[in-house]
Image (tube, helix red, strand yellow):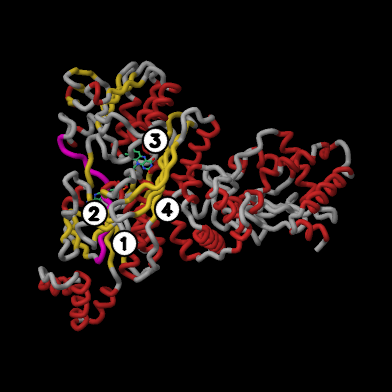
Amino acid sequence: MTARSTASAGKSPSARAAFAALTAALLAVLPAGGAWSADAERGRALYAECKRCHQVGDGAAHRIGPHLNDIFGRPAGSLDSFRYSPAMKAAGAGGLVWTGAALDRFLAAPRATVPRSRMSYAGMKDGSDRADLLAWLRLSSGGGPDRPPAQPTVTPEEYGLDPQLLTIRGDPDYGAYLAGECTTCHRPDGGEEGIPSITGWPHDDFVIALQAYKRGKRVHPAMQLVAGRLSDEEIAALAAHFRRAGDQP
Amino acid sequence: MNQGEGVMSQWKGNSGLSRRQVLATAVAASTALSAPAVLAQGRPRVVVVGGGAGGATAARYIARDSKGAVDVTLVEPTRAYYSCFFSNLYIGGFRDYASIGHSYGALAANHGINVVHDWAVSVDRDKRSVGLAGGGSLSYDRLVLSPGIDFKDGSVPGWDLSQQNRMPHAYKAGSQTQLLKAQVEAMAQGGVYCMVAPPNPFRCPPGPYERISMVAHVLKETNPTAKILIVDPKAKFSKQGLFEDGWQRLYPGMIERIGPDFGGDKVEVRPASMEVVIDGEVNKVDVCNVIPAQQAGRIAAAAGITNDAGWAPVVAHTMQSRADENIHVLGDASHQGDMPKSGFSANSQAKVCAMAVRGALTGSKVYPARFSNTCWSLIGTDDGVKVGASYEATDEKIAKTDGFISKTGESAEVRKATYEESLGWYAAISDDIFS
Ligand SMILES: Cc1cc2nc3c(=O)[nH]c(=O)nc-3n(C[C@H](O)[C@H](O)[C@H](O)COP(=O)(O)OP(=O)(O)OC[C@H]3O[C@@H](n4cnc5c(N)ncnc54)[C@H](O)[C@@H]3O)c2cc1C
């Protein structure tokens, strides 16, 4: 473990500053012109749209989506440790490899490129936005020693939530009953279609999302209604259930 | 159960014993007679009548979660269920017919549910058995009725079921929906589509008005001088502000609604001459969509568990009939309180019922009932709206606790996202009912 990954685990302001400085340093060594003329710094800001689900960089782990390290040149749906949608696996088996061009096409219209994938993202319409994003991704996903540290997908602090909420251990069997209210809209498996798949979500991401809805920090009328009457224990139970459901074949 | 029934019928009328004690006695008696039969009898039996949003969900959840401990039989006459939900989108050209059809194959294959394609025609509550039109009968420990709706005879003078081909209701989906769509598409240029809207309570409160939107969408493209006339006995209707705003924006001048203040409640139809008489005034129309007043599916009345209005009152905590604790009633047929009669509601109630049934029959854990509903409606291309609420069980009824509704003036992106959400909901609830 490098000093950087330790810094990313503690979310102190000084770690953020160090990270920004590091990014600047990395950008300074980029070759001018050619494919890399895209603005990776802008791409880093655009990556905010991806960051809710994907980690990239030193110490990145699977979250709602797979980590993106070393993605360039990798066949789609090919990391053994991640539970991909059948559609994504089939795309990889069918020859889809994440070259820069393939990623560009996918990001422009994910659902048109890999229909029934679980990725809940409408697409990045602007080509130069995508170029910038991919420049950032190339920089942060490569295997070099200067890879920046992975950032957390979400933290309780972002929503002003008490971190203690993450320590509640829920009863997955109770969660299985409560989940009946979720599966009317969220398919237990299969592709996302206007409503995201929630099966297999990491515990913390699940709890933070529902707590944020419950407290009105995330806005969606149906989700605020559902989460609004869930107790902290019930949210933990649901998180435990959906986490467990992700382990089942 | 034959021997058991024989024993039980001797006990009939003995008010000193509860049904459960009678059952225990019956099983004990037959144990002495033939051991192998007892093994089969030891597995509690649930019969579900109606393979729609409520019934198929209940069958699936009971069978799935009891992991074979409960014997589940689903009685449903049709081999393919065409959902009313999204049937308006089919009329509007946003879905094809196959996409709203569902088969029962997965319920049998994945959960071991015994699917019997027949009509239930009678319920013997003392013997706890259901008679089938095909002649057989099925005995039960718990009966779940989710038969949807039937129409009230005579609620629209001049109309009865024999006229449903000239004046379709399309309020039970399938060939009726196909017929109405074909009639709309065949309308003469500048013709009149008339809807006779139903009085409260009826299935899917926004359903008639979503249908108006979809018919208008079709006519705007193919028959822009056509007119739509709604004859409505109700002063107000669901999502009224949202629909009327949408109609003005998308279909200006096309839709006219006659409420009770102008005689919308005094209507008679003449199918032979395709006339609609509104408060004495005769209107000639090209298509007439008559949605009559409604009541619980006939089998609920046959079981003797309906109230004067024709619906089956239930206990909110378990969806048990107030007249018979061995019968649960779900969905449109139930009289439960504040939930609208929707597929979402029926599916939500079915999960509470499934938990209660398993608890009673297998001793599995029972948690407090909770219900929710969201109804999406499509007004035009990418113009979706929704209304939703959460509910809890009180001793009196299913009571609304909180709710939301879309607003007029929302951005196009919000409306599009709402529409896309409805696609996700349809896919998910279909899986939740039939997979
Ligand atoms: C135009 C329209 C649009 C709608 N849109 C929506 C929507 O967007 N969202 C929503 O949530 N809801 C919607 N609904 C409402 C929804 O369709 C119903 O509320 C829902 O189907 C009710 O479920 P149920 O189980 O009570 O009845 P049903 O789904 O109607 O199922 C009843 C089943 O029982 C069977 N049956 C009846 N009698 C017997 C018998 N004696 N023996 C055996 N089987 C029997 C029938 O064949 C049927 O399959 C809409 C309805 C209409 C008409």
Given the image, what chain letter belongs to the residue carrying mark 4? B
Q: Nearer the viewer, residue B237 or B170?
A: B237
Query: Are labels 1 and 3 assigned to the same chain?
Result: yes
Residue A100, quarter of picture: top right
User: Residue A215 lies in magenta, yes or no?
Assistant: no
Front of the two marks 4 and 1: 4
Q: CA distance from mark 4 to mark 3?
A: 21 Å
Q: Along the polypeptide, which appears first: circle 4 or circle 1?
A: 1
Given the image, what chain letter belongs to the residue carrying mark 3? B
Tag of residue B9? none
Provide residue B91's location: percent of width, then percent of height.
Answer: 37, 32
Residue A61, quarter of picture: bottom right
- Residue that label 2 marks: B118
Q: CA distance from mark 2 to mark 4?
A: 23 Å
Q: Nearer the viewer, residue B293 or B3?
A: B293
Query: Are labels 2 and 4 assigned to the same chain?
Result: yes
Q: Secondary structure at mark 3?
A: helix
Residue at position x 34%, y 54% in the image: B393
Q: Is residue A249 visible?
A: no
Q: Is mark 4 within 8 Å of ligand 1?
A: no
The region drawn magenta spans B141-154
Q: Along the polypeptide, which appears first: circle 2 or circle 4?
A: 2
Please, is residue A108 above or below residue B16 in the view?
Answer: above
Q: Is mark 2 within 8 Å of ligand 1?
A: yes
Query: Are labels 4 and 3 assigned to the same chain?
Result: yes
- Residue that label 3 marks: B90
Tag of residue B114? 1
Instruction: Answer with the quadrant where ligand 1 appears in the image.
Output: top left
Given the image, what chain letter belongs to the residue carrying mark 2? B
Q: Which amino acid, by three-letter code, is at mark 3?
A: Tyr
